[in-house]
Amino acid sequence: MSHDPLTGRIVDSRYEVGRRVARGGMATVYKAYDRRLERDVALKLMHAHLADSPDFVARFRREARAAARLSNPGVVAVYDQGAIDGIAYIIMEYVPGPTLRDRIASGPLTVAEALEMTGHVLRPLGAAHRAGLMHRDIKPENVLLPVDGSVPKVADFGLARAVTEATQTSTGNILGTVAYLAPELITSGASTPRADVYSVGVMLFELLTGEQPFSADTPIQIAFRNVHEDIPAPSTRADGIPTAVDGLVASMTARDPQERLANADDALRAVREVAAEVVDEAGADDAPATSAAVLGAAMGAVGEEGAGGAASPSGADTAGSAGSADGAVGSASAPGAVSPAGAPGPTSAGVSASAVTPAEASLTARLPQGPPDPGAATPSAGMRTVSLPIGSISNTSGDDGDSKEDPDTRAAGLLGRRLLIAGGALAVLGAVGGTGAWYFVAGPGRRVSVPRIEGMTTEEASAAVSGAGLIWVEPTTVHSDSVPVGTIISAMPAGGTSVTVGARIQTVVSLGIEQKTVPDVVGKTEHDAQTAIIDAGLTVGQTSKEYSASVATGMVISTDPAAGQSLDKGSTVSITVSRGRASATVPDVVGRTEREARKAIEAAGLEMSIPTRANDKSVKEGRVISQSPKKGASGVYKGDTVALVISQGPKMVTVPDVTEKSESEAKKALKDAGFEVQVDKAWTGHVFGEVDYTKPAKGEQAAEGSTVVVRIK
């Protein structure tokens, strides 16, 4: 194998390009090393012919950004995007392991395994649908089975949309892997979540039976059968499949999208219900689990690692050997790759140019650039990625549907008859100078341009679509941060696309900014509160801290806006976190009046209890005798209480009657009553030595501890 010039190159001063892992019609995948983050990544480089389209480059970048916003363990993550010499590339998660296609190659899965695997695909697909993103190329090649046994991963969200939209306006073509294309994608190019559900339903059929629903020699024949035939019940191809599983496949693959499950979330609920029913019927012990045994079987079928897509089972770097090398798009040739009538052209996936008539060539696969690598496996017609002209297969037919003819023969016969009729019609037109040209100019074969309705209201858009002779389909609604309520976000086919009269126009209408409810996080830790706010679809704003007497340190006191309020998705919610109780300094209020003490205590952030009152001979009445806690005490917090004892002044005592008593008797009686005694002997002429009177006089009130003067006669 010749040396790849990109191998060994340093891209964007960051990514060291390693070996080529896979190559397809749209992209080549390399294993690379991210020097900045020191990890293996996958580098997917678009082919040069796509870089010639400014529309593609712009859409590619937009879809890559949209895919990068999908954060789900079941999605191959998109990390970065850029350009090498003007050619677009993306950097993706490197996922070593086989693809689901490799697993199917080892045989059908059990019913339980198939349902579990389908659930693994629907979960990330549901996240994409809720974000307004469609995959458009669900197939086993785009489901990766990591070697570490972690959940399967879906690769290449949005890339089919980027290529299809870039080519659709000029060519009117839709790209995709034909076996998994929903009928409405083939007939009108309309892509909604229901189209992805159809693809998953076909894949479930294949998991159960080991084969695709329809087989044919050319992709256009399979596309024809997708439009005109119901997907058969899996139980007609394999034994042991319950009726409920047949019904599940039918509900996912209904030809009329309105009769199909609406999105991946609805489909996942249906899968879970059927899985529960199957387990109940079989017994829980009999239901096998998709575990290391399943992944081990898959690993046994492949010898080469995958990278955001897988290499071929043989380990060779084959063009188109891994569908995920194309991403969610198909092999699209450079301009002029389709040969003119009668001229030999390059082969596509093993179908020789001589085996395809010129009429068929205009309807079948767009051919990959250059010949396939030697030894490349030849995929069946159903596994080829094709570029079909939108509306090239009508969803109506003159056949009444009751024919007993073999489906393959019937499809090929109908196609042959249509081509023969078309050729005959052209010959007649040429012979009669245009007689019957009304069919293509003014009749049902007339092509019209889809009006550009993005930004219109639904009423305006419906009128514009109907006025163009097209069919307005009930819109899909999604939330939008930038598009007003009731306004068209996108249309499929896109505005400016050439379609036949009567084509169905699918639209996505804005519900406006999604509303989210502020969660109640009061009393939670700061970390838990932030997590709850983010999980609610809101943004954590400023975090402030305040003291709180009732909320413990580190816990949320309040939010702004308050819990329960409705906000635009992504709005900011600020939180206030408790710093715990604030310490306080106890002031000294001893000796102050009660009023002065209260003022000082409250100024310190404390509270004063109802004071206790007591007599005190040394402290004036109405002033503080003592306080608790004392001045400057530690362990005191704001809001705590300070207790005071207020003086009532000294205790009043009645002066006892000590007249006519001896000096010693008088002293004893007065001291026993709580007084101090002062003896006055000024009248020394009296010789009896008895008390004449006291001052204060007997019977009067005097302060305990005060002095009573005793006169001796």
Image: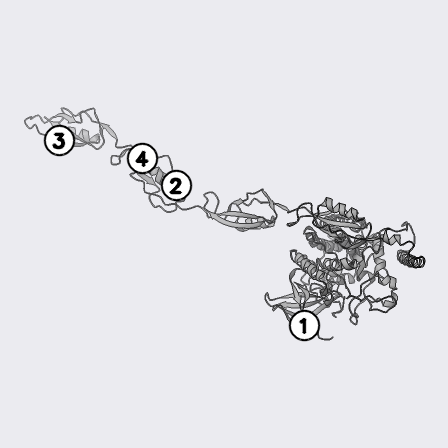
Q: Residue 7: which numbered mark, if any?
A: 1
Q: Position of residue 25 (x, y in %)?
A: 76, 65
- Who comes first in sequence, dot 1 or dot 3? 1
Q: Residue 606: which numbered mark, if any?
A: 2
Q: Position of residue 255 (x, y in %)?
A: 81, 50
Q: Secondary structure at mark 2?
A: loop
Residue type, numbered disc 2: Leu
- Who comes first in sequence, dot 4 or dot 2? 2
Q: Are marks 4 and 2 in contact (CB under 8 Å)?
A: no
Q: How far is disc 3 from disc 4 in space, using C-alphas? A: 35 Å
Q: Residue 679: which numbered mark, if any?
A: 3
Q: Secondary structure at mark 1?
A: loop
Q: Residue 646: which numbered mark, if any?
A: 4
Q: Nearer the viewer, mark 4 or mark 2?
A: 2
Q: Position of residue 496 (x, y in %)?
A: 76, 54
Q: Nearer the viewer, mark 2 or mark 3?
A: 2
Q: How far is disc 1 from disc 3 in space, using C-alphas? A: 123 Å
Q: Nearer the viewer, mark 4 or mark 1?
A: 1
Q: Residue 522: which numbered mark, if any?
A: none
Residue type, numbered disc 4: Ile
Q: How far is disc 4 from disc 1 in space, using C-alphas? A: 93 Å
